[in-house]
Amino acid sequence: MFTIGDFAAFGRVSARMLRHYDAIGLLRPAGVDPTTSYRYYTADQLRRLNRIVALKDLGFTLEQVGAIVDAKVGPDELRGMLRLRRAQLEARLSADALRLDAVEARLRIIEKEGFMSTDDVVLKEIPAIRVAELSAVAASYEGVDITPVIQPLYGQIWERLGAAGVQPAGPPVAYYEQSDGETVIVHAAVTVSPDQPTADDFQVVDLPALPTAATIVHQGSMGEADQSMQLLARWIDDGGYRSVGYAREVCLAFDPDDESKWVHEFQIEVTRG
């Protein structure tokens, strides 16, 4: 058997942690010297320690860890649980990264307040188009909620159009609808020919013409889109207009390896008064 210090070294944990696990009944020593109260462990107990550390590092509480290891979960089942938990943590990290990017973008907007020009806003007519689309619901308009929804939708719509032999007749178009005051219906659409029929794997929708639309071309990452949208809002308000309907995002250029080369046109239908 091994002393607590040696066992801690083999298990790459601290002796303090092992004493805590003993106190809460998570990992009892194999033996305790009745005279000195020194704890002793066996090599076989490394199996339980490995499971405890892996589960704890993946964010399970010690109470949950105890329940799992006491259930004598086999390696295959444990690996499945660890993979699921790892996927959850990776999703959380991705969401946190998106949120940090959004904070940085918002700070840049704040720094430029009072210095942003609305000269790039163009008022024009947008013709009607037919699109093939897929839709899903996002929790809010926040980028951290929109991005994980719209990206898979576009992957699916391109795949389904290809499988159906449908050739795009124009650029992709994203648009959004407020559904219940908080959640947002996200539409990932691709322009198709005017005679394109509907299909089982996607919807075909006619987007109406916008007789008068305030538009602006946004270059770069969609993480910086708030600045362009706020320029549109300023132009609309200063010009005595009000927005009508739903905003559209038309993708004019896309580089999967370089977001700085992305180009989108934002379109918002407006009317006077």
Image: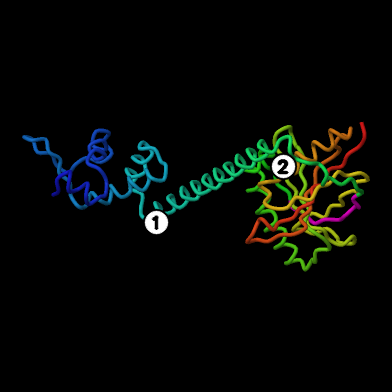
Q: Is residue 120 left or right of residue 223?
A: right
> Residue 49's spot in the image, x, y percent?
28, 47
> Residue 82's spot in the image, x, y percent?
42, 50
Residue interval drawn in magenta: 126-134
- Amino acid type indicated by mark 1: Asp
Residue 130: in magenta span = yes
Judged by depth in the image, the label closer to the viewer, 1 or 2, is: 2
Quadrant in the picture for the C terminus: top right
> Residue 152's spot in the image, x, y percent?
65, 54
- For disc 2, the neighbor class at 10 Å (few under 14, some 14 to 19, many from 20) is many
Which residue carries the number 1 mark?
A: 76
- For disc 1, the neighbor class at 10 Å (few under 14, some 14 to 19, many from 20) is few
- Amino acid type indicated by mark 2: Gln
SS at mark 2 in the image: helix
SS at mark 1 in the image: helix
Q: Nearer the viewer, residue 175 or 46?
A: 175
Residue occupying the far front of the picture: 115
The residues tagged by marks 1 and 2 sit, at their Cα atoms, a distance apart of 49 Å
Q: Residue at x 26, y 49 (%)?
A: 12
The disc placed on residue 227 is 2
